[in-house]
Amino acid sequence: MFDFLEGYDLLGAFWTTVQLTVYSAIGSLVWGTLLAAMRVSPVPLMRGFGTVYVNIVRNIPLTVIIVFTSLGLFQTLGVSLGAERFTVINFRLAVLGLTAYTSAFVCEALRSGINTVPLGQVEAARAIGLSFPQVLRIIVLPQAFRSVVGPLANVLIALTKNTTVAAAIGVAEAALLMREMIENEAQLILISAIFAVGFLCLTLPTGLFLGWVAKKVAVKR
C-alpha cells in the first residue's frame, strides 16, 4: 500500500520543515521582541517605525514576501546571505522571509502581554531610577512573556504551517515533496493523508505542550 513511498525522502522533507520552523521561530522571537519594545518606546521615531512595519507586513501575503526574497533580494540585488549553493541560499532566504512576516504577529502578541503589566509597577521602577530598557528587561518583559505563552503557541503553529510557502522558491520541504508525489503517483488521497498526519504530528504536540506551559507560568493577578 505504501510501496510508492520508496524513492522519496519523506523524513528529509519534514526535517527541512522542522528546521525552517525552528530557525524562523528564533528569529521571529528576537525581532518581534525588538518590535514590541519599539511600539511601547517613549521615542516617537521608534514607535512610528514599529507601527508602520507591523501594519505593512501583516497585510502583505506571505507568498509575496517569500517570492520577493528570491526574486528581489537574490536575483536582483545579489543578496546570498553568505551561501554559495542555490539550495542553501533559498533555505536562508525562506527563513528570512518567514522571520520578517511572523515577527509582526509575535510583536502584537507580546505587546498585548505588555499591556497587562500594571502601570504602577512601571511607574515604581522609573521612580527608583531604572531606565526604559531596564524597566522592559527586568519588570515588563518577564511578565509579558508569561502571559502570552498561549498566543505565542498559536503563532508558532501558524508558522509551522506557513513553511509550506517556502516551496514557492524551491525549498525542499514537505509541501514541495507532496506536490512532486501528487504529480508522479496516482495516490492523491493517500498522499494528502500522509502529509496531513505529518503536520499534525508537528503541530499537535507543540500546542499541547505550550498550552500546559501557559497554565504553569501564568501570572496571577
Image: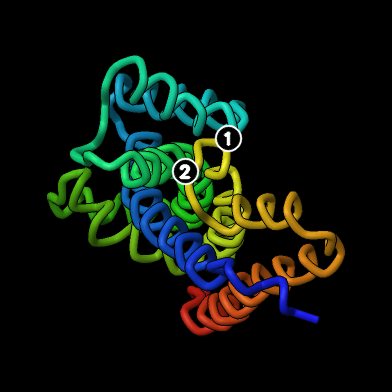
* Vertical position of residue 176 compared to residue 217: above or below: above
Q: Is residue 80 visible?
A: yes
Amino acid, disc 1 = Leu
Horizontally, is 206 left or right of 126 in the view? Answer: right
What x and y, as percent, mark residue 61?
Answer: 62, 30
Viewer-proximal residue among 157 and 217? 157
Horizontally, is 204 left or right of 38 in the view? Answer: right
Q: Is residue 36 visible?
A: no
* Numbered disc 1: secondary structure: helix
Q: Which residue is depicted at the point 26% across and 32% down?
A: 80
Viewer-proximal residue among 145 and 179? 179
What x and y, as percent, mark residue 209?
Answer: 55, 81
Q: CA distance from mark 2 to mark 1?
A: 8 Å
Q: Which residue is depicted at the point 26% across and 26% down?
A: 79
Question: In which quadrant of the rendered view does residue 167 lie?
Answer: top right
Q: Residue 62: which disc?
A: 1
Horizontally, is 103 left or right of 200 in the view? Answer: left
Which residue carries the number 2 mark? 98
Q: Tell me whether the residue at label 2 lies in contact with that at label 1, contact meaning CB atoms closer than 8 angstroms.
A: yes
The 10 Å Cα crowd at callout 2, few under 14, some 14 to 19, many 20 or more, is many
Amino acid, disc 2 = Leu
